[in-house]
Amino acid sequence: MKLTKKLFALLLVLALTVSLLPSAVAAGKSVTSLKDVSASAYYYDSVAYLFTNRYMNGTGADTFSPDAALTRGMVVTVLYNMAGKPETEYKDIFSDVPDGKYYSRAVVWAAANGIAKGSDGAFAPDQNVTREQLASFLYPFAAFQKMDTSAKADLSKYKDSGAVSSYARDALAWCVHAKIVNGVGAKTLQPKAGATRAQFAAMAYRLVMRQSAPETLDVTVTSTTRKDVKIPVYITLPNRFDSTKSYPMVILCHGHGGNHNEWGGFDKITNGLASQGIIAVTLDYPGCGASTEKFTENTLTNMKADTLDAVNYMTDHYPVDKSRVGIFGYSMGGRITLELLAEKSYPFAAVEFVAPAASTSDLKNLFGGNANWDKLKANAEKDGYASFTTIYNQTQQLSKAWFTDLEKYTNSLAAEAARNYAGRSLVIYATNDEAVSPKVSADVAAVFGSAVVNTYADGHSYSFYGKTPYTVNTVNESSVNFFKDELVTKLAGLSGYVASIEKDGSLRLTITASQLADNGFNTGDTVKITVDGTSYTALVSDKVGAKGQNVLIVSGETLTLTLSEGDFATSGKLAERIAQKDGTVQWHYLDTANIPAVVTIAK
């Protein structure tokens, strides 16, 4: 995944199954050929999907014209393409739609299927479309695609709801409910405003993603530790869920002050997991999201208890395979995960950390340093809570118990957790993380012997709030792949992951020298190694081999796959070497690589 490339390579393939549209469309050009579509634009993903799949064309050889007005002919043509270009015979039904135009058959098809209508015998294909008119196209198209269009939003909360035309009211109400059409700000819909090509791309993409999204259920789980408390829990079920079958499960733990899906940031991961046959579960911790408790109840003791209550609810009410339950922890959710492991609370089969808040001293820096921490703690002991405004401008009431819980473990937490966990793990962290020190994440990975995937932009935002295509795709793809490999595929024999890519391009593995010896391998053996599905032969040795020879170097407990001249990552088509101005080296995984890269060793 190069920084100039994007996004949905894996997750859209996962989410958009072949049943999504009536027929497949050959992939077109890459969005990177469009000079006027910035990777940071809100519509980037949308344009990339529509353009790459040839549902929507550019306006020139290298332009998309995102801000250009949208016409009726453009709309029906894109919808016709998204429907798979069904065989349609041209009919002279509109006076202004002759045969041979780019939109001719699309207009005939749309009229025949109730997706578009004309007026006084004309269709007006070149007429610009308003936001309410666009909703009136998308609404019947969704019904044509057999989506449920019964639910409607209450438009009265918008100041200009009275301006919505009667013909468009149901259509716009459904589109708002389905989050396909967003308000312009919190108070207005601007139904009569003109729609742009970029806005249409975003709406069409949201419609497709809604159609392909697995079912998510909202339930409340009774707390076992707090009287009369209901925990908001969200369950994303695999497509074609069958209650007679057994499923693996992953529970995702959100960060400090976040909510169950980090305001939509977890969605691609939960949907991706569901597309791989894994039940994905999220929850709102006390004082967050839909929780009715005050933030003063947001303590590690309560959050750990709620996590276990959600897991136990799932294993009691759904066909969850208890031996295949994974856990994902982001930031403070990573600390929750570490403490659950340290306390042997549940035998998790796979663990992922994203910038885990493992170090109390590091957390103190986030809360203003040692002196400010002590001041806040004293205020909490005196008044029951201390008010604090985070670097993300959230004002929170931190209870006395909040401080006590965070000081239960010092910086030995990761070691305590690793002693009680024998499975494999993944650590993702940004080298420019501003909230959790990259060193803290690296130390957790070292203690656990984890596979490591780095991002180099967006800091602590990752794919949940970040905008850089490399960051978004890397975090989402790695997370789905890791749990798929551990909970669904689970390679037999001697297998693991690339733990890291060294400066020279050699690959340090999560497989240890002890594991190699226990499986009957000795120095001097020639072994068969697969990395990301590509096979190599290598000599097991305690030193660098001859020029051009692949060597699996044993150094203490560490195994490193290398060439005598290094650069294995490049020659193996796994990653791209990026030299920095300060002399350091970064490795960016390629679009064609599945990450974290799976490694197997056999005779």
Image (tube, rainbow, N blue to C red):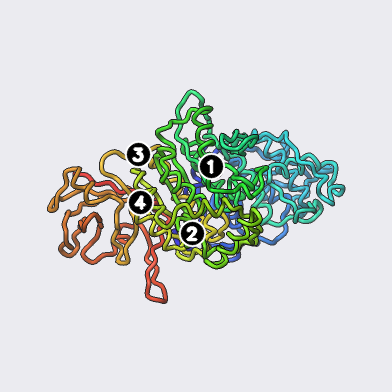
Per the image, the residue denoted by label 2 is 470
Quarter holding residue 548: bottom left
Which residue is identified by label 4? 448
| Residue placed furthest toward the front | 382
Give residue 210's position: percent from left, percent from top.
62, 42
**Foreground residue among 588 and 571:** 588
- Residue 490 disc label: 3
Q: How many angstroms separate mark 1 from mark 4 (CA)? A: 27 Å
Q: Position of residue 279 (x, y in %)?
A: 50, 36
Q: CA distance from mark 2 to mark 1?
A: 19 Å
The residue positioned 62% from the left and 39% from the top of the image is 232
Left or right for 86, reference 438: right
Q: Amino acid at mark 2?
A: Tyr
The image shows residue 56, relative to residue 20, as above or below, that is below
Mark sitting on residue 271: 1
Separation of residues labelled 3 and 4 (CA atoms): 19 Å
